[in-house]
Image (cartoon, grey):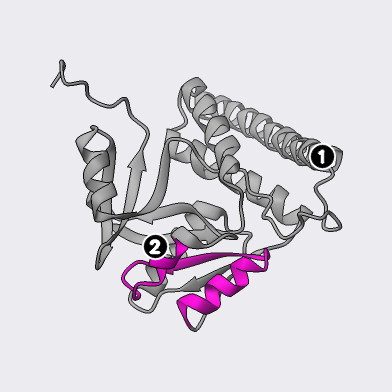
């Protein structure tokens, strides 16, 4: 009985320590958000800027931070690191300039909704768009990320010539097959470096594959291919 009471007191003490740590973690998160907001203000990134139609997303910076923290973790799974820090970054960006996800997914709307939340954070509202073009129009205004299911027509074929919109990311299903594209008003230098997307004609696709580039077609329309391009070292002929 004495041992049981001792153990319970020890457990209560540990729980009190956890409660204290939770409060400290919350304070650190709030401090991080304050610092991120100060950086944005120092850069002049506010809604009154001339480039205010561009999203505040920084996919390249996001990927760099998550990769660095993933290399430091001892117990936390890397997928959890990704989810936690994506949420933190989304909270910060949403506080600076609110945006939404304009979703068009007639085949798997619930699945796309969940994938949108996992990729861009639960704080962003997800609102349905009646068509791919309606979602793209919202993205072009700079107040939304268009998330459109691949297979909803050939809307993606026009992205290669669009001066305002870029493919931010792809929410890909198993086996590398495409599920949806996230499209927004974002300059190419802010996009992630490890994986990109492009609309390639058949001849260009063949040339890139011939050079050993990691290019995977995920949708086809006539002579055009929607491709995922992974950043890897091309195979040399000597190593082949």
In the image, is residue 40 above or below residue 77? below
Whole-percent x, y for residue 27 in the image: 77, 37
Q: Residue drawn 44% across and 67% down?
A: 158
Q: Nearer the viewer, residue 143 or 16?
A: 143
In the image, is residue 8 above or below residue 172? above
The image quadrant that residue 224 belongs to is bottom left
Secondary structure beneath label 1: loop
The image quadrant that residue 201 belongs to is bottom left
Whole-percent x, y for residue 111 in the image: 38, 67
189 relative position to 93: left or right: left
In the image, is residue 75 above or below residue 37? above
Q: Is residue 23 magenta?
A: no
Q: Nearer the viewer, residue 201 or 51?
A: 201
In the image, is residue 11 above or below residue 196? above
89 relative position to 117: left or right: right
Q: Nearer the viewer, residue 195 or 122?
A: 195
Whole-percent x, y for residue 63 in the image: 52, 36
The image quadrant that residue 22 belongs to is top right
Q: Look at the image and tell me whether residue 116 can be seen.
A: no
Labelled disc at residue 87: none
Q: Is residue 150 magenta?
A: yes
Q: Nearer the viewer, residue 142 or 34?
A: 142
Q: Give the residue pinned by disc 2.
A: 180
Q: Give the residue pinned by disc 1.
A: 43
Label 1 with label 2: CB-CB less than 8 Å: no
Q: Residue drawn 31% across and 71% down?
A: 151
Whole-percent x, y for residue 19 in the image: 68, 37
Provide the residue span drawn in magenta. 131-159
Question: What is the residue that sits farthest to the bottom in this orientation?
Answer: 130
Count numbered badges in the picture: 2
Foreground disc of the pair 1, 2: 1
């Amino acid at each position: 009985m004495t041992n049981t009471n001792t153990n319970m007191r020890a457990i209560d003490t540990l729980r009190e320590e956890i409660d204290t740590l939770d409060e400290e973690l919350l304070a650190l998160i709030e401090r991080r958000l304050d610092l991120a907001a100060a950086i944005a203000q120092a850069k002049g990134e506010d809604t009154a800027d001339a480039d205010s139609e561009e999203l505040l997303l920084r996919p390249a910076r996001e990927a760099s931070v998550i990769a660095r923290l993933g290399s430091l973790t001892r117990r936390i799974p890397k997928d959890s690191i990704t989810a936690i820090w994506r949420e933190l970054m989304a909270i910060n960006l949403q506080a600076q300039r609110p945006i939404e996800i304009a979703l068009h997914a007639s085949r798997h709307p619930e699945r796309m909704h969940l994938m949108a939340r996992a990729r861009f954070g639960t704080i962003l509202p997800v609102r349905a768009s009646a068509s791919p073009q309606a979602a793209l129009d919202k993205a072009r205004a700079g107040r939304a990320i268009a998330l459109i299911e691949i297979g909803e027509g050939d809307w993606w074929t026009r992205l290669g010539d669009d001066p305002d919109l870029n493919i931010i990311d792809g929410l890909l299903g198993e086996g590398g097959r495409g599920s949806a594209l996230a499209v927004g008003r974002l300059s190419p230098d802010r996009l992630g470096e490890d994986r990109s997307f492009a609309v390639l004609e058949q001849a260009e696709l063949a040339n890139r594959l011939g050079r050993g580039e990691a290019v995977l077609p995920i949708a086809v329309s006539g002579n055009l291919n929607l491709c995922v391009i992974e950043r890897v070292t091309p195979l040399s002929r000597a190593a082949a």
